[in-house]
Amino acid sequence: MEQFKTYALMIGLTLLFIWFGGMLGGKNGMILAFLIAAGMNFYAYYYSDSQVLKHYHAIPVDEDSASGLYAIVERLTQRAGLPMPALYIIPDQQPNAFATGRNYDHAAVAVTEGLLNLLDEREVEAVIAHELSHIKHYDMLIGTIAATLAGAIAMLANFGMLFGGGDRENRPNPIVMIVLMILMPLAATIIQMTVSRSREFMADEGAARMTGHPEWLQSGLAKLDNYARGISMQDADPQTAHMFIINPFTGRDFSLQTLFRTHPTTQERIDRLEQLK
């Protein structure tokens, strides 16, 4: 069922992108939008995981090189009925973690050195459970596709005038066209952020149920948020911020941060977990 939902969202966002291309450029714009969307979906599906791991200089580890971490992940995957994902450690002092991969058999979990240094074993287990919950519900692919197409819609809007406003006989009202070029990227971004925030709540709940101890994740989230405010992540990228358990830009002050943040506030997440006790 989760796989069906993932593909349905991918198709829905792709059709929205193609429709927008048609509004801006008629048949030519629709064809171009289709080709762009197909290429981006193909790339995101097959290569986004390796690209993001490479971007953050993630180092693969196994049972011999990270026995404690491996044991935690192995225990949780058996409990969740998931295959063992590939494990990585990111050489960064900001405490954080993310999961990536297109399906159960091509999944990876990455944690930073800062996270392993900061959290105790139970809190690490809760964070890993959160990431495995993302894997179980295909959240990594959903988030990547949503972010990719949101960026594509913004790009299409920026170059919309190059399409000439559609076929001459079907040329949209110039005012409508301008409004679409402004609102569509905004709407796509809000959809992306809403999807990301809702999936974080779901992964938190999944982690609490997987470990049986919501308080472990509550404690871990509080520590991660507190330390992330004082330590910036190297190579942090807004396009991948939604993947992390804590926004890597937590300590930076952005305008409109509340509207466009990729995560619920940590306090909101802690309060939701309190309800599960």
Image (cartoon, helix red, strand yellow):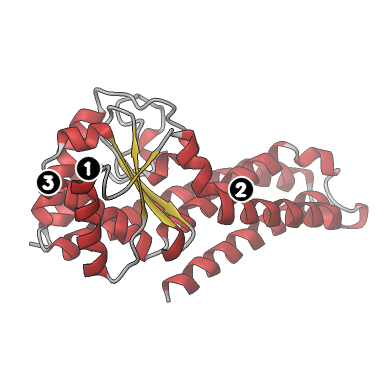
Q: Residue furthest right?
A: 168
Query: What amino acid is labelled 2 in the image?
Result: Met
Residue 187 showing in the rendered view? no
Residues at badges 2 and 1 in contact (C-beta under 8 Å)? no
Within 10 Å of disc 3 (Cα), the crowding (few <14, some 14-19, many 20+) is some
- Foreground: disc 2 or disc 3: 3
**Nearer the observer, 35 or 181:** 35
> For mark 3, what is the residue?
121
Residue 144 showing in the rendered view? yes
> For mark 2, what is the residue?
184
- Residue that appears at 77% across and 49% down: 24
Could you tell whether 108 is left or right of 184 in the image?
left
Could you tell whether 47 is left or right of 246 in the image?
right
Image coordinates for residue 101, horizontal then vertical, percent: 46, 55
Question: For residue 249, what is the image quadrant?
Answer: top left
Q: Earlier in the sequence, mark 3 or mark 1?
A: 3
The image's mark for residue 72 is none
Query: What amino acid is labelled 1 in the image?
Result: Thr
Query: What amino acid is labelled 3 in the image?
Result: Glu
**Nearer the observer, 134 or 78:** 78
Circle 3 sits in a helix, a strand or a loop, which is it? helix
Image coordinates for residue 78, horizontal then vertical, percent: 24, 68
Q: Cα distance, mark 2 to mark 3? A: 44 Å
Image coordinates for residue 37, horizontal then vertical, percent: 68, 54
Could you tell whether 70 is left or right of 190 in the image?
left
> For mark 1, what is the residue?
266
